[in-house]
Amino acid sequence: MKKSFLLSFSFLVLLIQWGYAQTDTIPSQKLDTVFIQSSRINSTLQKLPAAVSVYQATPDDATRQQLSLQEYTQQSSGLFAQNTNNFAQDLRISIRGFGARSAFGIRGIKLIVDGIPETTPDGQGQLDNLNLGIIDRIEILKGPSSSLYGNASGGVINIQTIDEIEQPFSQWKGSIGSYGFQNFQATGGINAENATYIFHGSYAASNGYRDQSGFKQVNTNFKANFKVSDKLIIKALLNYSDSPQADDPGSLTLEAVQENRRQARAQNVLFDTGESIRQFKVGLSTTWKRNKYTTVEGYLFYNNRQFDGKLPFEFGGIVDLGRDYIGQGASIIYSKGKNTLRAGYDFGYQNDDRQRFRNLEGTQGDLTFDQKERFTNLGVYVTDHLEIDRWYLTGGIRFDYNKLTAVDAFLENGDDSDNIVLNAFNPSIGINYAFLPARREGASTHSIYSSFATSFETPALSELSANPSDEQGFNDALEAQKATSYEIGFKGKFAKTFRYQLAFFRIDTRDDLVPFELEAFPDRTFFRNAGRTNRNGVEVEGVYAFAKAWTVSAAYTFSDFKYRNFTTPNGAFDGKELPGIPKHLANIGLQYRSEKGFYAGIQASIVGLQYANDSNEAEVKGYENINVRGGYDFTYKNAVIRPYVGINNLLNQEYTDNVRINAFGGRFFEPAPGFNGYGGVEVRF
């Protein structure tokens, strides 16, 4: 391992030495003031009494493989991403442990893309339609956020794609890599007198590291900004994603992993497991500055998703899901002097038409399940931000009405239609004190903050319809998960070169939603409520721009998350650690950027041991993962050309990319790829 690390470090040094040879002068790096929008009150990072990580895109993002959002978020403390290579299960992100239990996709975290919710009212989110090549900014608000966004226990991920351009452009990108990886993108921008148009299309495909793990995907995106007047701005969004192939190789036992890491589970091959999706989204958002003090904002969208999936069992092993999701919201913001008040509402309606058929070794058989599932949400909220000298106070309150309905259309075994109402009331309050306020722009500033918040998380419709009794209707035994959070932290910056955050938190939860499998229904995931959990954690992150062209960033997370009261038919797990979350997690990044366009970067992740089941009997070993990438810009006529290369898992570590929590039969492990690479070129006119 030491030898591999020395080789990687030497590689980086050689790149940087070559970069110095390309330029006589090197630009200085500065960390400017960061403004936060995900808090629903426009504030600076320094004044907000919460832990927030911000990623701002740079031209060097072209050198990323752009295979997963994890490439952009790994420098955020408190956030842990898994499953970056199984595209049938989607990326799994957890914030402070919330989301780790997800059977697929992202749970317990509110996803917002270009001001429009991507998370459905029942709390389920996917990012398979996200165009990574046009990401401009990501805000990660950590901790319970239900007073702001409703059904969100762990926090908020707010993603903004390219929105404004200085002049018309076209950009083309192509890359190839290990395991048959391909990624081709085209982006264009047009400026009119009072309008901006952004077009983007991409094609990505791979054979996959493991057997039966390939995928193909086409994404298209269109954005338009219209400045109707000095007071009114309208934004339009159109997105279409088509993924005809996303194979699922399944999870393996430890013995099978040791035998052959690249094999697919035999059961998954037999039943031809995987998924295909088609998703269409259209949305509008407006900002109307009514007068000097009052602004009105609103949004409206429609989302249609068609999902076809094959699971590794016969009865109900083929899923046909059609989803319609509409949403609309509005708010009024009154800002005068040092006080900003915002009041608004969010409405969402989700209509799932779910059918299951027999999976006859990859061929569709008879219908076994036919149910229409609806989730109606109406949330009303008020937030306020007040500044008094060095004190900054933020408070919020929200009420959510949630109605869940199941209409049984498979009446051969009786009518199991059902209705559930899960309402929630959530307050939050935070206070920030600047014990060293900034005396001028760019000066050093330091503050201490404290906050209290509550949250709730309803079971998703797919979780409720997975009934251990194997009946239609909902699993009425499931309750909504609730959490109470206490946090204290420090944040600050030294001039424009060093910024840091430090947070200590405790979160107490009730009725945690926990996945499990049953011997009677192999490979099906069910859910139950744990009594209580205690989550104590520490998060540290910072970025230091030094020596002109150099920037180093680091993040560390300590997670002591345990069941306080949890008993199942298999035993009592009081005092056991929550599975799927490492106790120790660290990330370190070093970047170099010359004035002449040379870029080199190295990213190291250190992931500690985690557990795969509630009893903590199955351990998942920790690992160190180092990635390097580099590129160089040069101009030819009117084109900027950027060739680049990257290497993933430079140490060729054998580690687990995804942990299937509480999987039956010890099938916890999905192996990650070993040493692999990619390269490509981007051309911009």
Image (cartoon, helix red, strand yellow):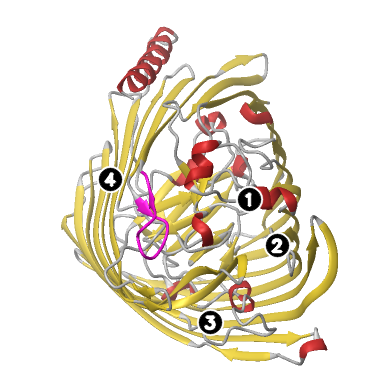
Range of residues picked out in magenta: 610-621
Instruction: Measure how far apart labels 3 and 2 are at the Cα level.
Output: 39 Å
Q: Earlier in the sequence, mark 4 or mark 3?
A: 3
**In-front residue for pair 525/325:** 525
The residue pinned by badge 1 equals 130
Question: Is residue 680 something that shows in the picture?
Answer: yes
Cα distance in 3D space between marks 4 and 1: 36 Å
To which quarter of the image does residue 461 belong?
Answer: bottom right
What residue is shown at x 27% (from left), y 44% (from top)?
A: 499
Q: Please state which of residues 585 and 252 is positioned toward the viewer in this rendering.
A: 252
Compare marks 4 and 1 and give the one earlier in the sequence: 1
Between discs 1 and 3, the one toward the N terminus: 1
Q: Residues within 10 Å of mark 3 (few under 14, many from 20)?
A: many
Amino acid on which the number 3 mark rests in the picture: Gly
Q: Amino acid at mark 2?
A: Phe
Which corner quadrant holds the N terminus? Answer: top left
The residue to which callout 3 is attached is 379
Please state which amino acid type lies under the numbered disc 4. Glu
Mark 4 or 3, closer to the camera: 3
Which secondary structure, mark 1? loop
- The question of residue 347 being in magenta is answered with no
Q: State the residue position of label 4.
A: 441
What kind of secondary structure does the magenta stretch mostly adopt? loop
Q: CA distance from mark 1 to mark 2?
A: 30 Å
**Residue at the spot of label 2:** 313
In the depicted structure, whether residue 555 falls above or below residue 552: below
